[in-house]
Image: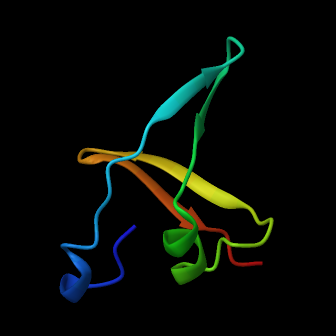
Amino acid sequence: MLKSKENENNKEIIKTWLTGQHSCKLIIPKDFAKEYGLDEPSHVIVEGTSNGILIRKLKI
Protein backbone atom coordinates (compact mmCIF):
# COMPACT_ATOMS: atom_id res chain seq x y z
CA MET A 1 0.00 0.00 0.00
CA LEU A 2 3.00 2.27 -0.16
CA LYS A 3 3.50 4.65 -3.06
CA SER A 4 7.25 5.20 -2.74
CA LYS A 5 10.25 4.98 -0.43
CA GLU A 6 9.19 8.36 1.04
CA ASN A 7 6.06 6.72 2.44
CA GLU A 8 7.69 3.66 4.06
CA ASN A 9 6.73 4.94 7.51
CA ASN A 10 3.12 5.55 6.41
CA LYS A 11 1.84 2.32 8.01
CA GLU A 12 -1.02 1.45 10.33
CA ILE A 13 -2.01 -1.69 12.17
CA ILE A 14 -5.58 -2.67 11.39
CA LYS A 15 -7.76 -5.66 12.27
CA THR A 16 -9.37 -8.20 9.97
CA TRP A 17 -12.63 -10.07 10.57
CA LEU A 18 -13.72 -13.42 9.21
CA THR A 19 -17.08 -13.06 7.50
CA GLY A 20 -18.89 -16.28 6.79
CA GLN A 21 -16.82 -19.30 5.87
CA HIS A 22 -15.16 -18.02 2.70
CA SER A 23 -14.01 -14.45 3.19
CA CYS A 24 -12.16 -12.00 5.39
CA LYS A 25 -13.05 -8.33 5.78
CA LEU A 26 -10.32 -5.69 5.91
CA ILE A 27 -11.18 -2.13 6.91
CA ILE A 28 -8.80 0.41 5.36
CA PRO A 29 -8.59 3.71 7.27
CA LYS A 30 -10.35 6.47 5.33
CA ASP A 31 -7.21 8.62 4.92
CA PHE A 32 -5.36 5.63 3.37
CA ALA A 33 -8.33 4.85 1.13
CA LYS A 34 -8.55 8.44 -0.06
CA GLU A 35 -4.79 8.69 -0.68
CA TYR A 36 -4.90 5.62 -2.93
CA GLY A 37 -8.18 6.37 -4.72
CA LEU A 38 -10.28 3.81 -2.85
CA ASP A 39 -12.65 6.21 -1.09
CA GLU A 40 -15.43 5.42 -3.58
CA PRO A 41 -16.67 1.92 -4.45
CA SER A 42 -14.07 0.34 -6.73
CA HIS A 43 -12.43 -2.95 -7.63
CA VAL A 44 -9.04 -4.09 -6.37
CA ILE A 45 -6.62 -6.86 -7.26
CA VAL A 46 -5.54 -9.05 -4.34
CA GLU A 47 -2.31 -10.89 -5.07
CA GLY A 48 -0.27 -13.24 -2.90
CA THR A 49 3.46 -12.48 -2.94
CA SER A 50 6.49 -13.88 -1.14
CA ASN A 51 6.27 -10.83 1.19
CA GLY A 52 2.57 -11.12 1.97
CA ILE A 53 -0.60 -9.81 0.33
CA LEU A 54 -0.51 -7.02 -2.24
CA ILE A 55 -3.75 -5.03 -2.70
CA ARG A 56 -3.91 -2.56 -5.59
CA LYS A 57 -6.64 -0.66 -7.35
CA LEU A 58 -7.83 -2.17 -10.63
CA LYS A 59 -7.51 0.43 -13.36
CA ILE A 60 -10.23 -0.04 -15.99
Q: Is residue 36 above or below residue 14?
A: below
State the residue in front, 38 or 47: 38
State the residue in front, 5 or 33: 33
Horizontally, is 45 left or right of 50 in the view? right
Horizontally, is 58 left or right of 49 in the view? right
Image coords of residue 22 (percent x, y): 67, 18
Q: Is residue 48 above or below residue 42?
A: above
Q: Is residue 22 above or below residue 53?
A: above
Q: Residue furthest top?
A: 21
Residue beneath the point at 24% across and 48% down: 51
Image coords of residue 38 (percent x, y): 65, 71
Image quarter where the C terminus lies is: bottom right
Q: Residue furthest front?
A: 30
Residue beneath the point at 74% across and 61% down: 43
Image quarter where the N terminus lies is: bottom left
Figure quadrant of residue 20 = top right
Image coords of residue 44 (percent x, y): 65, 60
Figure quadrant of residue 24 = top right
Residue beneath the point at 32% across and 58% down: 12
Image coords of residue 55 (percent x, y): 50, 57
Residue beneath the point at 44% across and 37% down: 15
